[in-house]
Amino acid sequence: MTSIPPPAEELRILDVELARLDARRAQLLARRAWLVSVLQQSAPPAWPARTPATTGPDARPGTAGPHAPRETAAPGVQNVLLTLGGILLAIAAIAFTLVSWGSMGIGGRSAVLGTITLGALALPAFLLRRGLSATAEAIAAVGLLLTVLDAYALHAAALPDTDPLAYAAAACAALAALWTAYGLLVRNLHLPLPAGVAAAQLPLLLWWASSDAGPHLLSAALLVTSAASTTAALYLTRVPARVTAGAGAAAVGVFGLLTATGLILDAASPAAAAEAAGHLLFAAAIALHAAWRSPRTELATGAAAVAALAVLIATGGVLRTLLPGEWAVVAELLCAAALLTLVRSALPRPVRRGLAASCALVHVLVLAWTVPALGASVLGPARQLGEVWQGATHREAVAGADGLAVAAALLIVAAVLGAAYRGGEGRTWRTPAAVGAAVALWAGLATLPLSLRLPHAAGLTAHLTLAALALTAALLAARALLPEEAHEPAADKAPQPSTAAAPGRALAATALVCFYASALTAALLALATEAATFTTLGLLLTLTIAATALHPHGVAQSTLAVTAVAAATGLALALASAGELPAHQAAFVLLAVPAATALLGARLRTEPYALPVELAGAGAAALTLGLASTDAPALSLTLALAGVIASATALRADRRPAAAYLAGALFLLATWVRLAASDITTPEAYTLPVTVPALVIGLLRRRRDTEVSSWTAYGPGLAVTLLPSLAAAWGDPHWLRPLLLGSAALLVTLLGARHRLQAPLALGGLTLALVALHELAPYVVQVVGALPRWLPPAAAGMLLLTLGATYEQRLRNARRLRELVGRMQ
């Protein structure tokens, strides 16, 4: 083993090594300087030495001298010149043919043009033997253009009465053959063979345009052209020709496939659909052959996907004419599922991937087709909210699709995804497949009650059963993870991803979401009758309580516990509604829910869902206050009872601070509401008897425990009198109450400042400021009305200038005041 020296020794070694490197660098720099001086003395004067101004990256374009950089390379200049020369020759040939040349007629021009064409096509071979390949390509391009002009001249001179489109089709075929033969004969030219392949895409299309044939012949012409181009792309050896043929095959094939798809969608009879399906199957054969023979994986996968899609469109189009529209979708889905079995066959991997992609696309489209029906089944019962306990109103069938077909499609998708999950050991898509299968299975079962048009009671029972099954599945999936999680690595080891447990966790969460969806549907359906409401909410309460106790995970437990509180709240409201109680009396029935949650929170304080249960109870208490707000005396009593519940919660050490403040606020609000409900104009007679003993109790507690905050000791007692009196003073037109309240607030403020107590200082100061503002408000309004209009903006500007000038001093004073108040108890 290599011994490591101590730090001091290692530092000494590093310093010695750095000094040696510096000495060596100085020696090499001296040698370099001597060599540069020798070269400068021996160099001829006609060759200036290189400087950074004429060489290197900073040299400017166009710098004079033998070492000036070139902006353009020689091959680039050559290609530009040849391209421009070919373009000019082509323009001259077009002008010569189409316009005129002296008094020469079209026949003479054709003869001259033919002679020039032969020379232009023969010259490249001579140039290639001389090594001038670029020039040969340019001349060959001009020769190819001249053959097009020859064809035009032939039509104008000898065949003027021929149909232009028919002649163009024949000319394209002849030119394609000529250019292909020329490219194969002169093998070193790159342009003729791709040009021949490109020209071969047009004859059949032009021939169809020249005839009065229908769209069936157009589809056939496009697909035959695509087949020929596909064969050329697969068997040609030259890369430019293969690329051109492949691009032509793809473009023409897509247009042919779209044309055949339009034909099969417009077919009104099975015979017409079968004819169009034949075109689609021919397109599928072309694409499958390309996928099988293509050397590139991406192209093979895409071609296989197109082939599978063409087959599915063909079968779907034929089935559409034989079956009703909704069931044709199911049949199409079955065809996609059957085609998906080829993924397990011995086909090449790219072909199997393309087939799987197309089948997956069909499944996704079918799922999108089922969304409206699923929404009507799950959320349609929301209409019952407007007619509570007045009978079932949600009996209509699924709009836009047959419900049984939708349910069948969803169940088929669930079966396919389940098979994918079972056959995908170790694959990353097992978890999405499991989740998709669970959701599709639940959706299929959820649409069945409405699809079968079951009676209201049977439909409600079905949704409740589905909710219970989903909740049971969530529990089983969650508890099945316990043995695996027990063997997870310890905290000091690196965590490893558990691929086996991932589907289980996803299934548990998915099943829980499905339970909530079914429970919501059942709860909405239950609003039809009183008995159904009590039965459904009772079952949901029982299920959620049992699931909370049995579920092994804290987050799901908390969610289920909150759901149980919501069900209990619904039961309380239903009970009050059954008793025909007004809203303010129903609030007292609903108060049982927060009281029960407070008791449960005390009993279950060690459970992770104890706090969520108490918070859910607090939400029910807020709903209670909303119901009681319609009657002031009832609201006062409700606030007092809620304060009692909060006070009981404050007996627990872990809830004491928040619950104690909440209880004090509720009691105070209850007092104010009671005084307002009784039309009390002199609240001090009722608040002062409470304030005096409260302050005495606070003083005794402060003497016993000096760490108690002044807000706890004196805050409630002061607030009981100061705040109601302040509210009364703002509506009192007389001067006595504001004077007495202002004096009391000043005294409280001075006592707080003297003893450095936050509660008296803050409450007294706030009350004193508001009383003063109330008394001075009329005079301020009068003064503002008497002042010129320019004075307030000017005063505001001066104020801003003053504040800006003394900003730093104000901040320092505010910081000192904050520190002083912070040191108060």
Image: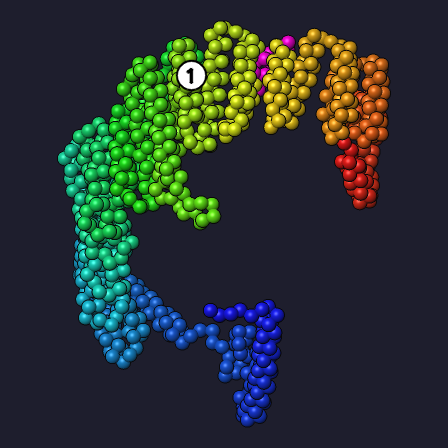
The residue at 19%/57% (across/down) is 231
The residue at 37%/14% (across/down) is 393
- Asked if 306 appears above or below 781 in the picture, the reply is below
Q: Residue 796 in the image: x percent, y percent?
A: 80, 36
In which quadrant of the rendered view does residue 158 lie? bottom left
In which quadrant of the rendered view does residue 359 lie? top left
The residue at 20%/64% (across/down) is 180
* Image side of residue 679 versus residue 434, left or right: right
Q: Nearer the viewer, residue 389 or 786?
A: 389
Q: Which residue is mark 1?
A: 537
- Magenta-tinted stretch: 622-633
In the image, is residue 627 part of the stretch drawn in magenta?
yes
* Image side of residue 724 versus residue 633, left or right: right
- Asked if 56 appears above or below 245 in the picture, the reply is below
**Residue 614 appears in the picture as rendered:** yes
Q: Residue 128 in the image: x percent, y percent?
A: 26, 77
Q: Nearer the viewer, residue 797 or 604?
A: 604
Quick one: label 1, few (<14), some, or many (20+) residues within 10 Å?
many
> Magenta region, mostly helix, strand or loop?
helix
Tag 1: amino acid? Leu
Q: Nearer the viewer, residue 222 or 337?
A: 337
* Image side of residue 534 versus residue 781, left or right: left
- Asked if 620 appears above or below 301 in the picture, the reply is above
Q: Residue 271 in the image: x percent, y percent?
A: 14, 35
Tally of marks:
1
- Asked if 257 appears above or below 230 in the picture, the reply is above
Q: Nearer the viewer, residue 424 or 561?
A: 561
In which quadrant of the rendered view does residue 160 lie? bottom left
